[in-house]
Image (cartoon, grey):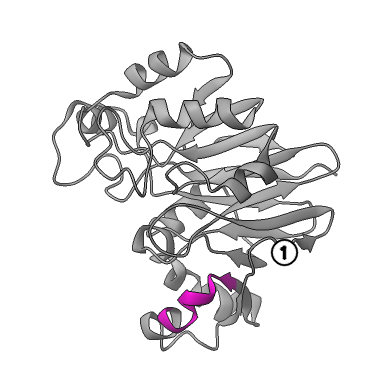
Amino acid sequence: MDATFILLGTGAGPGLPSFFCDCAGCREARDNPALARTRSGAFIDTGNSKLLIDASPDLRHQLIRESITRVDGIFMTHWHYDHFGGLGELEYYIKLARNEAIPIYLPPSAVEQFTAAFPNLTEAFAVKSWQFARQYRVDSLGITPLPANHGIETAGFLLETAGTKLAYYPDTAGLPAVSAGKVNGVDWLICDATFHGDNWFPQAHMSLEQAVDLGRQIGAKNTVLTHLAVHYSRPATSRQLAEEAAAYENVCVAYDGMRIKL
C-alpha cells in the first residue's frame, strides 16, 4: 500500500490570517477561508502507521479537518512554539482513546525543554531523542533526520519508500553540505519559503526565490514552497504567490491539506 504525506499546515508563526494584520493576504484569507494557512506541520499515513511531523498550535483543527483519528508517533523538527505548541491537544486522545504513551522523537537539545514546557504530560509521551543521519524504519518507510540551518538544533526529514524520496524542510536557510548531498535528486523538496520579498532572517529562513534556487541546486524533481508568511516584507495574496511560482518549472505553492503519494 502506498504511503501518503499530508501537509497539515503551510503557514509560518503568525498564521494566515493573523488577528493583528490587515494586509492583502490576510484580507483575502478572511474573505475566503479556503485560502487560510494554519501553522506548519505534516502527517504520514503508511497504511499501517499514522505519524505526525511537528504539532502546531492549530493541531486540533488540522486533525479534524483531515478526518485523522489516530496518531502512533511524532517526529519533531525543532523546539519553536509554532511547531510544538499543539502537543497538549493530544492529552485527551491519549487518556481516553489510545491508553498508552505516544513515542515522540525530539532533537537531543529539546528533551529537557519538553519536560519544562509540559510537566504534566510526561506520562502521555514516550520521549526519545532522534540522531542526525540515523534512519528510522516505520513499516516500508524510512525517516532520516538531517541537519537544517535554523539557529537552534533543527532537522529536516528525508522520507524514503521503494519508489519515492521526499525531503521536508519547513524551517531552514539553505542546507548544510551534508544534508544537500543526502537529498540530492529527491522527487519532492518541500521547503521553507517564509519570506516574500526581502528575507529579514537570512540565517534562519528563505525567501520564495531562495527556496526555488535551493530546489535547483539539489536537483529536486519538484519543489513545494511552504512555511509561508505573506505579511513579511512585501505582502502577497495566494493568487500572486501562485503566479510567481508558476514562472518556474516544477515549482508550486503548498496549501493546507495538500497530499503527496510516496
Q: Which corner quadrant holds the C terminus?
A: top right
**Is 203 placed above or below 197 here?**
below
Residue 213 percent across, percent down from the top left: 48, 26
Q: Which amino acid type is marked by label 1?
A: Arg
Residue shown at the point (44%, 79%) measured from the top left:
114
Taking the magenta stretch, the answer to whether it contains residue 110 is yes
Q: Quadrant of residue 3?
A: top right
Percent from the top left, x then y, of residue 123?
A: 55, 88
The N terminus lies in which quarter of the figure? top right
Helix, strand or loop at mark 1: loop
**Residue positioned 39% across, 16% down in the render:** 244
| Image position of 65 with respect to 105: above or below | above
Quadrant in the picture for residue 216: top right
In the image shown, does 40 or 200 lie closer to the viewer? 200
x 46%, y 75%: residue = 110
Q: Decide: few, some or many residues near mark 1? Use Cα within 10 Å; few <14, some 14-19, many ≥20.
A: few
Horizontal side of 260 relative to 201 (left or right) equals right
x and y percent of residue 255 in the render? 47, 33
User: Which is nearer the eye, 204 or 47?
Assistant: 204
Tag 1 residue: 134
Q: Is residue 244 above or below residue 229?
A: above
Which quadrant of the view contains residue 36?
Answer: top left
Main structural element of the magenta stretch: helix, strand or loop? helix
Nearest to the observer: residue 200 or residue 191 = 200
Task: State the count of labels.
Answer: 1
**Magenta stretch bounds:** 105-113
